[in-house]
Image (cartoon, rainbow, N blue to C red):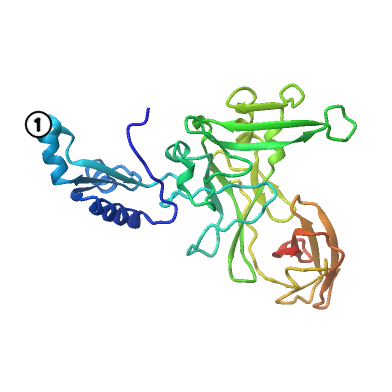
Amino acid sequence: MSYYFNKVFTDKSFEEAIDDVTDQLKVEGFGILTNIDMKSTLKEKIGVDFKRYTILGACNPNYAHTALQKEDKIGAFLPCNVIVEEQENGATGEHYLIDAEEIEYGIGDWSADSVTKVIFNWGVSLDANHADPGQYLSTHPLAPQYPTMHWGWNAGYRFIRADGTFDDNGDGTPNLIFQYHMVGDQFVKKISVDAHSMINADDELEVWITGYYERLFNEINLSMFPSVHGSTTPIPNLWVNITTEPVFGIFDGRMEVPVDTTNTSTGINPVENLNSLSIYPNPSIDGYVKVSLVQPLSSEVQFDLVDLSGRIQDSYRTTNQGFVEFTDLAKGFYIVKATDEFGDIIAVSKVQVQ
């Protein structure tokens, strides 16, 4: 049973949300009598850290007078409390709908030149999971989608929607359909991933994480359970696999590094971007790119062209400050990695073939 009304702001800061709520209350004739900053209060009184959480005490004098005339004990519920709280996944409550076929997502403007770890929640936060999807703009991840990601107001959103085919008879050809839709608040999970980052040619910070989505289905018999919706067996196995397999890890062009499930260092340092690559044209429209180091080396350099599954598609070695050419590339995204004569990575960059 829900005992409150709520609205999720996805395009405002915490302070802007308070201002907006205050303005909207004024339009309806409510003034703010009290403003309680729970984060500061709890820190001051008992020394604990808490998310940003403000309680606004709102009152409409006419409504209050009418209510008190009918029941003078109604004062126990006055003023009317309005809560503005920070979501667990950020001040603006940001969500991302990740498509396994898409590889690039903008995550806003940050004052940073490197990132070594990313922490995110798998799933949808409790309040947002049971809110009305119709409140969002059509471009928002929690807005109605096709195919739909929303199961219903009681159940909430699908945290995973995996639809496809699999090979049931071992002849190498997928012949049966499977559907796995994970639903349920109990599957919200915080994930900590060591990440590799670099500054690209457009002076943007790129953070690279690999999602090995096939690992979701490790130790799951698709022939026995071809279609499962909700939270019944073996849906919980997918949830376990997210961490234990693991599904997420570092990607530096060829090397896999597991998720740090214990929140301790894996002992592997992110690749330092000691040099940078000149790639032209990028994006390519005919499958041809020319690659060289911006700061040439006199020693031998190897250039590897790697697809996003980690397979090396082509390799060249060059000396005397030369360049290499990759041709007949299929449409998609690639990573070009340069290594020196000692095998150390000296530059990494992304290539798109349209």
Instruction: Please tell me whether residue 26 is drawn above or below residue 186 in the rendered image.
Output: below
| Quarter location, residue 221 | top right
The N terminus - image quarter? top left
Residue 24 on image: x %, y %: 29, 53
| Quarter location, residue 5 | top left
Instruction: Please tell me whether residue 21 is drawn above or below residue 244 in the rendered image.
Output: below
Instruction: Please tell me whether residue 16 is drawn above or below residue 73 in the rendered image.
Output: below
Which residue is labeled 1 in the image?
A: 72
**Which amino acid, mark 1?**
Asp
Mark 1 closeness class: few <14, some 14–19, many ≥20 residues within 10 Å: few
The structure residue drawn at horizontal position 69% and vertical position 43%, both measured from the top left corner, is: 212
Q: Is residue 189 left or right of residue 49?
A: right
Task: Judge by depth and name the residue closer to the eye, 88 or 270.
Answer: 88
Task: Judge by depth and name the residue closer to the eye, 223 or 259.
Answer: 223
Q: How many marks?
A: 1
Task: Judge by depth and name the residue closer to the eye, 200 or 221.
Answer: 221
Q: Is residue 333 left or right of residue 330?
A: left
| Quarter location, residue 68 | top left
Residue 195 on image: x %, y %: 60, 52
The structure residue drawn at horizontal position 40% and vertical position 56%, both measured from the top left corner, is: 12
Residue 321 on image: x %, y %: 80, 78
- Residue farthest toward the right in the current orientation of the protein: 171
Check disc 1 and report its element: helix, strand or loop.
helix
The structure residue drawn at horizontal position 33% and vertical position 48%, both measured from the top left corner, is: 52
Task: Judge by depth and name the residue closer to the eye, 343 or 171.
Answer: 171
The C terminus - image quarter? bottom right
Residue 353 on image: x %, y %: 77, 63
